[in-house]
Amino acid sequence: MIEASVKSRLGDFQLSADIRCSGTACLAGKNGSGKTTLFRALAGFIPSEGPVMVDGADVSELPVERRGIVMVTPSSCIPHLDIEAHLRWGAKLKGKAAPQEAIVKAKEVLGIDFGGPVKSLSLGMRGRVSLATALFASPKVILVDEVFSLLDDKENFVISYGKLVSDAGIDMLFTTQNEEDGRLAGQTYIMNNGTTIRRP
């Protein structure tokens, strides 16, 4: 579970957002509403005030690499790596090895049926690889920022990926500009002008 009540100011933009969710959750809002800013605050990429709790532990004073939170964006991939090396990279950073059978399963479930360097892939395919890589890093929370919107089969992919992260004991929060995408999540928050409202 991730629980947070964070405030941050970036120029004229004021973030003042509260969130409490587990499983798969959706953060919906228009472009510029503050979704990415909130994710960056949760992950520790920008300074913020207020607690960020992950599974009951306050991680707000911890550096990015110790928060147990991974943020995936459309530019998260490492272009020069080939796909197999990329999938293992997240686990390697944690001093672990991703089991080959788990990699085979994830590739099959997520439609990663291609090879070669990541830089040769489309944005959508790069997104698939980055999301699988995040899974093998074994974080407690994965923040998916606008990556699902790059996919043609978004609905099926979100459901499949959500099952993988759930089976791994990971919580996931994803952003979208379409409130209807909330049907793919157990909980939905609406973001507007830097604030969040939980949708019933």
Image (cartoon, helix red, strand yellow):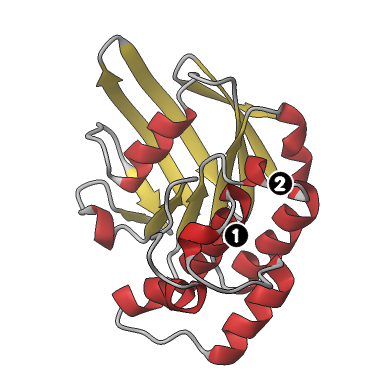
Residue depicted at 61% across the width and 57% down the height: 125
Residue 133 coordinates in the image, percent (x, y) = 48, 68
Mark pair 2, 1: CA separation: 19 Å
Residue depicted at 74% across the width and 48% down the height: 154
Using residue 180 as the reference point, say whether residue 198 is left or right of it: left
Residues packed near mark 1 inside 10 Å, few (<14), some (14 to 19) or many (20 plus): many
Using residue 152 as the reference point, say whether residue 117 is left or right of it: left
Q: Which residue is mark 1?
A: 128
Q: Secondary structure at mark 2?
A: loop
Farthest residue toward the top?
A: 12
Look at the image and tell me whether residue 18 can be seen.
Answer: yes
Q: Is residue 149 above or below residue 126?
A: above
Report how many numbered discs are placed on residues in the image.
2
Return the disc, 2 or 1, that comes first in the chain's sequence: 1
Residue type pointed to by label 2? Ala
Residue 101 coordinates in the image, percent (x, y) = 61, 90
Q: Nearer the viewer, mark 2 or mark 1?
A: 1
Residue 124 coordinates in the image, percent (x, y) = 62, 50
- Asked where in the image residue 55 lies, by quadrant, the reply is bottom left
Q: Which residue is mark 2?
A: 185
Residue type pointed to by label 1? Arg
**Of residues 38 and 77, the one drawn nearer to the viewer in this rendering:** 77
Q: Secondary structure at mark 1?
A: helix
Q: Which mark is residue 191?
A: none
Residue depicted at 47% across the width and 84% down the height: 98
Q: Is residue 161 above or below residue 105?
A: above
Residue depicted at 58% across the width and 81% down the height: 103
Look at the image and tell me whether residue 200 can be seen.
Answer: no
